[in-house]
Image (cartoon, grey):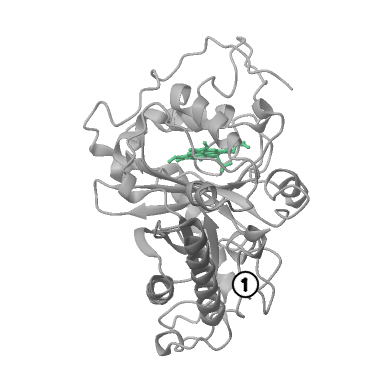
Amino acid sequence: MPTEPENAQDPIRPATTGFGRRGALLAAGAVLAAGIGAAADELARGDRAANRTGSAGGPPPGPAIPFHGVRQAGVTAPQQPATQLLAFDLPQTSAAADRQTLRGVLDALGRTLAAVASDTPPDPRLQGGGTTRLTSLVGVGPALAARLGLDVPAALAELPAFPGDRLDPARGNGDLVLQLCAADRWTLTVVAELAGTAAHAAGAAPRWSQSGFLPRTAPGTTPRNLFGFKDGTANPDDAAAEQWVWGPPGAHRNGTVMVYRRIRMDVAGFAALPADRRDRVIGRRAGDGVPLTGTAEHDDPDIYAKNPDGSYVIPVDAHVRLTSPRLDGGARMLRRSYSYDDGPADRGLLFCAFMRDPAQFVRVQDRLASRDALTPFLQHQASAVCYVLPGAAAGGTLGEQLWT
Ligand code: HEM
């Protein structure tokens, strides 16, 4: 495995976490000018691709995305524009009683999610515009798995604390995590209510909830985050996902582990940097997402390429260097993050990543927390990790593998 090169290239500043300095309010307007032209092109393409008629409500919905399948559609289906994450806790009585409660909650969630994702969702509020295109995933947290002796992948574990974390426990963790995704906010609001009611009736207590969204993006192109950069470019292809994302052969083959981080972003502070600095913080160009060493968005960033003066083209503290799979024996994670907006001072990224072994996240985040040039503009505010269950076959229930 290649080792990380040393480099004396100018760091932008020491990687302290939080929005330490500067008021930096000026820049929101100047934000991301480089990306605007490209984004407009993408939207124009998207309009054509979606064959919009100009009627209210946007493009017509496509066919329903089945709930049942070998793997949960919340990981496998193309990323949808809107998300709602919900977490629940289970009562703590005896292991036997709590196992029974968990079975009931998973059964209730499975039935509800299958019904709302179908061609004929039962709630009249979901019947106006064709299918909901709802996708979902359900996962169990490591504390619940340990408490109830569930059969989960050995790698499932709580995340350690990282330098700079400012985690609010009320916004993170949880015995069960549910992620809903859909084309629109309305569907999510209704489905979150139905799923929450079903889980609660079966014995689960709501713990936290968080909504997120993506910009409109043409099919097959990469959405941007609130810093204006394309986010999700370097995701694994199917073959790499089989190796690094989905579980090892055996009972957990069709499951994966999700790491969730609610990361507040100093959007104005980042936008106050000169455009070329922003590109060097990430290691890619904001406008087109091309790595500083490449000519096309999907070129692999070459973290070993050097300038004539001997410095690295992708700076030593650039985000794509410190997250490079080359520093991790080729290990990849599948990122399907969303932006969130909970008020002008609380906007950021809902980092959602899927991997076989969450130790991969720990290694990467350890590097980011101490050295990433992006870190001074970020504050990790909530965290959760869960085992995303294999899918349920028609007639089956979610979590059948947990009881072996
Ligand atoms: C708000 C926080 C973050 C922002 C704004 C951000 C942004 C980006 C951007 C713009 C890219 C380059 C485009 C792409 O390949 O998607 C990227 C790549 C990546 N990021 Fe982040 N990121 C954030 C947090 C994280 C965290 C917490 C992790 C994991 C600990 C992470 C892991 C990765 C990985 C693995 C890549 C791909 C590297 C490669 O294969 O080239 N990111 N991120």
Can you give x and y, in whole percent of width and height, for residue 2 in the image?
72, 20
**Eyeballing the image, is 29 above or below 403?**
above
Residue found at x 42% / y 79%: 57
Res. 208 in view:
yes
**Eyeballing the image, is 280 above or below 27?**
above
Q: Nearer the viewer, residue 184 or 277?
A: 184
Left or right of residue 245: residue 125: left
Can you give x and y, in whole percent of width and height, for residue 286 in the image?
49, 40
Residue found at x 53% / y 47%: 146
Q: Nearer the viewer, residue 391 or 187?
A: 391
Read off the residue under disc 1.
Answer: 397
Can you give x and y, in whole percent of width and height, for residue 103 in the image?
54, 68
Left or right of residue 209: residue 320: right
Residue type at the position of mark 1: Thr
Please state, as top left, top right, bottom left or bottom right, where the C terminus lies in the image. Answer: bottom right
Res. 280 in view:
no
Residue found at x 60% / y 17%: 312
Which type of secondary structure does the marked residue at label 1 adopt? loop
Please tell me in which quadrant of the rendered image residue 46 appears.
bottom right
Can you give x and y, in whole percent of width and height, for residue 108 in the image?
50, 75
- Judge the density around disc 1: few (<14), some (14-19), many (≥20) Cα neighbours within 10 Å: some
Q: Nearer the viewer, residue 333 or 215?
A: 333
Left or right of residue 92: residue 357: right
Residue found at x 32% / y 54%: 341
**Eyeballing the image, is 229 above or below 395?**
above
Please tell me in which quadrant of the rendered image residue 54 appears.
bottom left
